[in-house]
Each structure stands twice: as C-alpha cells, then as structure tokens.
C-alpha cells in the first residue's frame, strides 16, 4: 500500500499519475504514496523523540480523544530509528523499468502459491465475492504483491517507525504524524498484536494497510470481534475488498486487458486520458491481444503504452483507477492486474517489453524534461519521474520531428534531443 518510498521494492509513484491517467481529481492525501521525499532534516542521535515533535504528536492524540497517560506509556520509551531515516533520505538514482518491476512481482512461484491459496480458502473467497463484488483473483493478487500471501508483512514496530518519520521527515511530517495518531488509536483498540507490527513505513498486515486506511476501511470478516489484518487473512482480504469498493470498484468488470494495435496506428490516440468505448477502439483497429473481439462493447477504456510502440499496449477500464488508489504507480497497478490474470490461469503478456533498453537515470530524465520544456512542451517540474505529463510532452515533441509519437523515453530519444540545437 501507499506508504514510504521504497518499501518492498522500488515504488516510484506520483500522486498525479492516476489523476492525469484517467482524468480524475488528485487522490486524497491519505491515499498517496509519498514517493519523492526531501531528505529528512538532520537529527541528533537521541534516545527519545524531540520535544517539539513529541508535543505535536501529543496534541494530535488529544484531539483524537486518546488518553494522554496511555499515549505517554506508549511513546515515552520510543527512540527514533536511524536506519529508517537513512532509507528515507537516500535518493534513488536509477529507475527500475516497468518490466523489471512486474517480473520481480509476478513470478511462477507467486502464481502457484496464489492458486494454492485460492483453493485452500475457496469458501472465504466465495463469501468475499458475494459480499463485496470484488473478483477473488484481484484480492489474491493484492495479497501476493503486498505481503507474498502473508509471508512478508513487516516486523518493524509501527509506532516507532511512524514516530521516527513524524519527527525526522520534515517534508511530510504532518502526514506521518497523522498516521502515528491513527496507529495509536488502533493500538488502543487492541484488535491487533501489541506492539503493532508492519513495514518500516507503517504499512500493516496481510494487505499492508496504512493506519488511516485501516481506521476507515478495516473489516472483521471472520466474526471474532476483532479487525485483525495481521493474524486473519479473511479480515485483511475483506478490508481490501471494502477499500476497493470505496475507491469505486465496479463489480463484474475487469481492470483492463492487453490489446494489439493495427499496422499504421495513429499513436496520437494513445494519449492515456481519452476514454472511448471498446466498440470505438475496435473501430480504430484495436483487438484483444488474444481473441477476436471485445466482450463488452460499450465499456469505456483508455489506451496506454507503458513502454512505447515496441512494448505491449493496454486498454484500462475504470477499475484500474481503484487499484491505483492502493498505490499510484502505474507499474504497481499493472502488476496487480496481471497477477490476477495469471492466477485466473491466463498466460503472460502476448507482446514482450523492449528489454534491451537501458532505463534512463533520474538525472537523465530531468535533463530530458528540461529540454522538452525549453522546446515549449510542458513536462511539469523536472522531477526525474516519467509521468503522464512527461509522456505527453514527449509525444508532442516526437510529432514535431516526425518520430512515432509513443511518449516513450529511452536513451535513443535522449540522444536525439541532446543532439538538437
Ligand atoms: Ca476478525
């Protein structure tokens, strides 16, 4: 789930991606992945939380109605964890290509393990589908991606992790403080283990809920009176289903599908934001990557080519947007959708990724963004992240010089723009 920068592998989300991808308002703060954090403020080694920061936490806890003595009992002995601040402050220089992310997350072992879980918990999954209308393969895919089906839920004490971030990550201190207060409320409710355990960025349980999301959406599905996403997979899966429904999941619809583009396709149509019905896409020559015709002609979808004209193309349905609520990275959401398909028994992508390509470094992406902006193609701030605005700027520039406008940034493209005067 949307939490720290690189917990469980290279999450490079931008909050604006989903918004621009599907024409939505930006996500609420609680659902964002704080991907680009400024290096945290320097802190002296300490055996306790800095006094000013602690006062802010205490005020937040009081406002939430928590007993000050009980909050003190939980926080007085907490010392910041320097390893967390070091991890948060490290700036990722290299960007993982989307296929590397998907390959690492959708392994044969993870598919087999997930299918075994679907068999073992078949009655639970049937009840979840009945209650929430969310496909069991999607729920299992979240479970697999977030914690390897419970095998890696994180064993860091959540209060200490969040207190460290609330007092050390100046750029997002307010976000972490709110999550810490939420975690204090959860600890007091007593539904989970004491101390609460999670990732170093505070994501908890089988499906890695942040505390604020837990408070809003966690469910007691097994009926033992506790919303226990740590020790009850049914509770965690139901909580995810509930969160997806609250995020707009449409029962009976998929996330999207891989498609084949016709020869001579006008790549200007793949602008990531224009919804067309599947019938209209078919009229433009698109076909399912496997199969002859789209099943649901009136359904709306946007077209995206995450790795340009040489990689696979996808039509994304509105449910993709609900997956992005969990984590705003395109690579993440595509991974969940693809793992769900594989768990259902479908094969891998029909078209391979341009695996020979080296990924651009953050520095190179910044350079590309700057050069695009200098040419009048607004790429947003030069943040070193490829998002929808950067891809749109690339498409516009590619069109002006007669290249296929697929919006894909590779080393050849950077060389080309650097060679221009
Ligand atoms: Ca329960």
Image: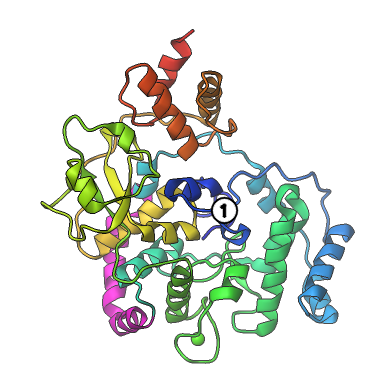
Pick the front one: 256 or 2: 256
Residue ID at (71%, 56%): 165
Residue 16 on image: x %, y %: 53, 46
Residue 411 on image: x %, y %: 40, 23
- Mark 1 surroundings: few (<14), some (14-19) or many (≥20) residues within 10 A: many
Is disc 1 placed on a helix, strand or loop? loop
Magenta residues, as a range?
103-131
Vertical position of residue 213 compared to residue 351: above or below: below
- Residue 297 located left or right of residue 18: left
Asked if residue 164 is among those painted magenta in the image, a careful observer would answer no
Residue 281 on image: x %, y %: 23, 46
Residue 208 on image: x %, y %: 52, 66
Residue 14, visible in the rendered structure: no
Q: Residue furthest top?
A: 421
Q: Residue furthest left?
A: 292
Characterize the magenta stretch by its predominant secondary structure: helix
- Residue 188 located left or right of residue 339: right
Asked if residue 123 is among those painted magenta in the image, a careful observer would answer yes
Residue ID at (30%, 85%): 123
Residue 253, visible in the rendered structure: yes
Residue ID at (88%, 58%): 52
Which residue corresponds to mark 1?
Answer: 33
């Amino acid at each position: 789930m949307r939490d720290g920068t690189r917990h469980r592998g290279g999450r490079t989300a931008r909050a604006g991606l989903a918004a621009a991808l599907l024409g939505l308002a930006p996500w609420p703060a609680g659902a964002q992945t704080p991907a680009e954090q400024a290096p945290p403020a320097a802190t002296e080694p300490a055996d306790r939380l800095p006094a000013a920061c602690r006062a802010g936490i205490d005020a937040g806890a009081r406002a939430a109605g928590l007993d000050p003595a009980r909050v003190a009992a939980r926080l007085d002995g907490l010392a910041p964890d320097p390893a967390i601040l070091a991890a948060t402050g490290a700036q990722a220089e290299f960007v993982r290509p989307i296929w590397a992310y998907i390959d690492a997350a959708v392994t044969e072992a993870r598919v087999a393990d997930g299918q075994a879980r679907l068999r073992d918990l078949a009655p639970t999954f049937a009840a979840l589908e009945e209650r929430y209308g969310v496909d069991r393969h999607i729920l299992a895919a979240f479970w697999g991606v977030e914690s390897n089906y419970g095998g890696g839920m994180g064993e860091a004490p959540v209060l200490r992790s969040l207190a460290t971030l609330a007092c050390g990550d100046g750029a997002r201190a307010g976000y972490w403080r709110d999550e810490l207060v939420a975690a204090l409320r959860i600890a007091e409710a007593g539904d989970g283990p004491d101390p609460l355990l999670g990732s170093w960025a505070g994501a908890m349980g089988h499906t890695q809920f942040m505390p604020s999301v837990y408070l809003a959406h966690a469910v007691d599905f097994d009926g033992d009176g506790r919303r226990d996403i740590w020790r009850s997979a049914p509770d965690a899966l139901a909580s995810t289903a509930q969160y997806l429904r609250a995020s707009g999941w449409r029962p009976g619809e998929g996330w999207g599908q891989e498609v084949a583009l016709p020869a001579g396709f006008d790549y200007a149509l793949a602008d990531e934001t224009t919804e067309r019905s599947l019938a209209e896409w078919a009229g433009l020559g698109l076909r399912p990557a496997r199969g002859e015709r789209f099943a649901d002609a009136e359904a709306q979808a946007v077209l995206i080519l995450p790795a340009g004209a040489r990689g696979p193309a996808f039509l994304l349905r509105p449910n993709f947007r609900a997956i992005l609520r969990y984590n705003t990275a395109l690579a993440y959401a595509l991974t969940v959708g693809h793992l769900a398909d594989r768990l259902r028994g479908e094969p891998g992508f029909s078209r391979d990724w341009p695996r020979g390509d080296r990924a651009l470094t953050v520095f190179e992406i910044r350079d590309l963004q700057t050069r695009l902006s200098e040419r009048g193609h607004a790429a947003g701030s030069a943040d070193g992240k490829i998002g929808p605005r950067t891809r749109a700027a690339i498409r516009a520039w590619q069109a002006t010089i007669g290249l296929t406008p697929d919006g894909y940034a590779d080393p050849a493209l950077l060389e080309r723009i650097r060679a221009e005067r």
